């Protein structure tokens, strides 16, 4: 991964390009090793460190500030992240495919070899208690631990059986009736049965074309246990093995019932704590990704809605700025520069927004929260078909304010309201005609007069 990074200079790539490279290349480089070996924690940390540095424009020599936690970045876009793969969870999903294949392909050569050495793969992978003896390889021990009780028991809980002839489904220990196995539903009965490892086909017989359940008990049942036994037989009354159909396995997270690495990964990702990002912000972010703007602008909007931009006050909190005289806004030099002030409450920014709303011929939207302002602005475009351009002007305005602020700080350029407004009008037209309204009959002069009419025409 380091060798591949040496051929790319992160400084020459926008953050949108770096996200694309991480998703398409850096996350797939260790794919071959991850699909067979359990990666050590130290290796995972080093790989994540390499990805993190590349994302934020750093290198082995130069360190950059990571403005958003890696856990948030690895969340799906619909939950507030960037959708970058969580390597640890991806490694588990890849390895769990071996467990699924071992269960579903018992007659393959490699399955027979493992079964000869370690015993039944079905029992090893699906039973609650597995004995780890001496002579087991590291690879086998790592595979056994994937998705077990100390790891949430997610693998076994996501497998169910579809009843056919009943010759391959264990009556008590396998999940074939409802979301739980009968051993867990009726533990007292399980301890009284004379055949704890029996199959479904062994617990009954067919008489006059009708299936009769016949569960054998090792001891006399108490009155409570007898009631439970009657309840169990009542539940199974309408269920019977199908002689013309073989037993099969079903992977619950996938609608098709077939196992896939992606469905396993998505399940693991959804099981991770998902309330890292505020629900209101997540709702706004879901609308953000629909907009057809350059990727670097979309990611800028993502950081803005998360309030993770390097404003002066944010740099103070990181210990980068220590002189309190440098806290002031780059535009007005009166208030502390945080996101709310810089983009919405500064007198300079208010004049920019006033001109933008005047150009759009709409009422000025007063600021409360970043996500609230974003949603209110998007409501101005009322047609749902125009979702790709709903926040086009909002993103261009905040993007232009941020560029003007940086030019003031680092290049000494004096910000001018009319110049910024003209830039916003031109940038939004360029995005509109090049990405969204390429079939539109409107001209630049029409955009300058009534942009909402142009957006509604799409």
Image (cartoon, rainbow, N blue to C red):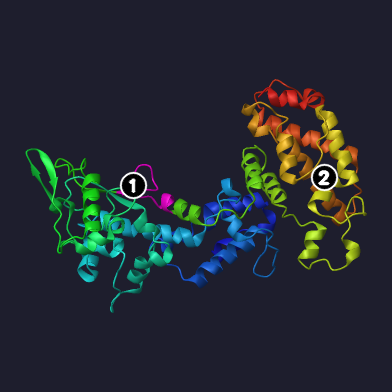
Q: Which residue is mark 1?
A: 258
Q: Residues within 10 Å of mark 2 (few under 14, many from 20)?
A: many
Q: Is residue 154 visible?
A: yes
Residues drawn in magenta: 250-264
Q: Is residue 206 left or right of residue 48?
A: left
Residue at 13 percent across and 49 percent down: it is 204
Residue 344: mark in rendering:
2
Residue most extreme to the front: 223
Q: Find the distance from the CA under tag 1 to the CA under tag 2.
A: 51 Å
Q: Is residue 283 above or below residue 458?
A: below
Task: Say whether residue 145 is left or right of residue 423.
Answer: left
Quarter-of-image position of residue 109: bottom left
Above or below: residue 32 compared with residue 306: below
Q: Secondary structure at mark 2?
A: helix
Whether the magenta-drawn stretch holds residue 150 is answered as no
Q: Secondary structure at mark 1?
A: loop
Using residue 443 as the reference point, say whether residue 288 is left or right of it. Answer: left
Q: Quadrant of the C terminus?
A: top right
Q: Residue furthest left?
A: 208
Q: Which is nearer the eye, 191 or 396?
A: 191
Quarter of the view holding residue 395: top right
* 415 to the left or right of 54: right
Q: Is residue 111 visible from the viewing direction of this image?
A: no
Residue 38, x across and y down, in percent: 42, 67
Q: Which mark is residue 32?
A: none
Q: Which sits in the foreground, 337 or 213?
A: 213
**Residue 298 percent location from the top left of the image:** 67, 44
Residue in the picture at 15% in, 54% down? 215
* Frontmost residue, 66 versus 130: 130
């Amino acid at each position: 991964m380091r060798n591949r990074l040496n051929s790319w200079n992160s400084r020459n790539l926008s953050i949108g390009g770096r996200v694309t490279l991480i998703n398409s290349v850096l996350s797939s480089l260790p794919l071959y090793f991850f699909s067979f070996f359990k990666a050590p924690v130290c290796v995972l940390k080093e790989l994540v460190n390499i990805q993190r540095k590349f994302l934020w424009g750093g290198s082995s020599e130069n360190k950059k500030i990571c403005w958003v936690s890696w856990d948030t970045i690895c969340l799906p876009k619909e939950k507030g992240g960037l959708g970058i793969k969580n390597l640890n969870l991806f490694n588990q999903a890849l390895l769990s495919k071996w467990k699924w294949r071992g269960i579903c392909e018992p007659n393959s050569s490699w399955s027979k070899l493992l079964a000869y050495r370690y015993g039944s793969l079905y029992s090893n992978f699906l039973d609650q208690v597995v004995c780890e003896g001496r002579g087991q390889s590291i690879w086998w021990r790592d595979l056994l631990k994937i998705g077990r009780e100390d790891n949430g028991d997610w693998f076994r809980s996501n497998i169910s059986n579809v009843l056919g002839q009943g010759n391959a489904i264990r009556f008590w220990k396998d999940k074939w009736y409802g979301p739980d196995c009968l051993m867990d539903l009726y533990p007292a009965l399980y301890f009284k049965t004379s055949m704890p490892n029996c199959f479904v086909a062994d617990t009954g017989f067919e008489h006059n074309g009708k299936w009769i359940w016949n569960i054998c008990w090792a001891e006399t049942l108490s009155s409570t246990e007898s009631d439970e036994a009657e309840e169990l037989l009542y539940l199974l009354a309408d269920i019977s093995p199908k002689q013309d159909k073989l037993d099969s396995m079903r992977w619950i997270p996938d609608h098709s019932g077939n196992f896939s690495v992606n469905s396993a990964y998505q399940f693991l990702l959804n099981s991770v704590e998902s309330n890292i990002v505020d629900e209101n912000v997540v709702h706004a972010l879901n609308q953000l990704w629909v907009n057809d703007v350059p990727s670097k602008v979309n990611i800028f909007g993502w950081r803005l809605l998360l309030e993770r931009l390097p404003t002066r006050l944010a740099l103070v909190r990181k210990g980068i700025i220590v002189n309190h005289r440098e806290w002031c806004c780059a535009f007005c030099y009166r208030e502390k520069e945080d996101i709310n002030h810089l983009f919405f409450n500064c007198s300079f920014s208010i004049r920019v927004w006033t001109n933008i709303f005047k150009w759009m011929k709409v009422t000025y939207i007063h600021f409360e929260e970043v996500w609230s302002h974003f949603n209110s602005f998007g409501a101005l475009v009322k047609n749902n078909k125009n979702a790709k351009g709903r926040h086009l002007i909002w993103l261009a305005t905040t993007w232009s304010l941020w560029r003007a602020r940086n030019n003031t700080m680092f290049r000494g350029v004096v910000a001018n309201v009319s110049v910024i407004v003209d830039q916003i009008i031109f940038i939004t037209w360029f995005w509109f005609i090049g990405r969204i309204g390429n079939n539109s009959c409107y001209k630049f002069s029409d955009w300058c007069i009534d942009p909402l009419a142009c957006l509604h025409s799409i």
